[in-house]
Image: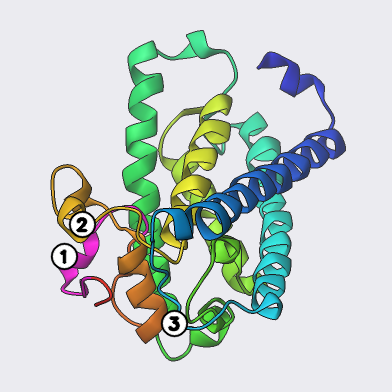
Amino acid sequence: MNSIQELNMTQILSIQWLMNVSRYIIIVGGSYLIFWRLLKHKLNIKTHNPNSIKFKNIKREFLYSLQTLTLFLIPTYLIMEYSKIGVFKVYYDINDMSLTWYFLSYVCSFFLHDTYFYWTHRLLHTKPFFKFHSIHHKSLYPTPFAAFAFNATEGIIQSFAFVFISLLIPLHISTFMIFTLYSLIHNVYGHLGMDILSKERMEQFPFRYFNHPTHHGWHHRYARGNYGLYLRFWDRIMGTWKGGLK
């Protein structure tokens, strides 16, 4: 990972953009192909959308997601540039911190990101800020392509989650790459537009602590409640948990 430090900023941002877009296309496109095209009829999986999917909606979700993935370069620039002077707690040599911390940092990132997302998402649902979030809610019944379909302002707000995290805790550079991949996969799962687990299974351990497509689908349908990203924790604590679609 020390080789990253040998690259100039243009190279770093170019690699980051290509990684962001290729991950999105592979994971989103793969999810759509597998679940919406190949397995939906074979496994008799019902989508949340009672109507046929429209290409114009997928196109909108895709183009806004590409915009967001480009905006994600802003925190990359800030973190890489200002970690040089100690503003952000980023390290490149894995031996600089213990192996225990390396794995624990994923757990901390998970809870910190979920907290950041809940409160910024809830803020975006207040009257003064909803205009920045309304683009995302044009997907009344989302598809996997909607994972990052944000207005530019919202895209910047959500991208700064990792600025927030790296201000608080030390993170190895590989942690960013691996955790953002997990975050993308979970985000695509939340926007899958269908349930691949039964309602009974979703309420069993450990699935009952997590958000599933039915829960985020409810949020898209009614534009309130179920603000969490990974967990139901903050929604339960703050009384904004609404359950899933019927």
Amino acid type assigned to the residue bearing label 2 in the image: Phe
Mark on residue 109? none
Q: For this view, does 245 lie left or right of residue 220?
A: left
Label 1, label 3: how many angstroms apart (C-alpha)? 29 Å
Q: Quadrant of the N terminus?
A: top right
Image disc number at residue 236:
1
Q: How many residues crowd mark 3 within 10 Å: few (<14), some (14–19), many (20+)? A: few
Range shown magenta: 229-243
Quadrant, the C terminus: bottom left
| 120 horizontally vs 239: left or right | right
Give whichever of 37, 96 is nearer the camera: 37
Residue behind mark 3: 50
Residue shown at 15%/64% (left/top)?
A: 237
**Position in image of residue 184 (x %, y %):** 52, 48
**Amino acid, disc 1:** Arg
Magenta highlight: main SS: loop
- Does residue 94 appear left or right of residue 230 in this picture? right
Q: Circle 2 is placed at which residue position?
A: 233
Q: Nearer the viewer, residue 45 or 228?
A: 45
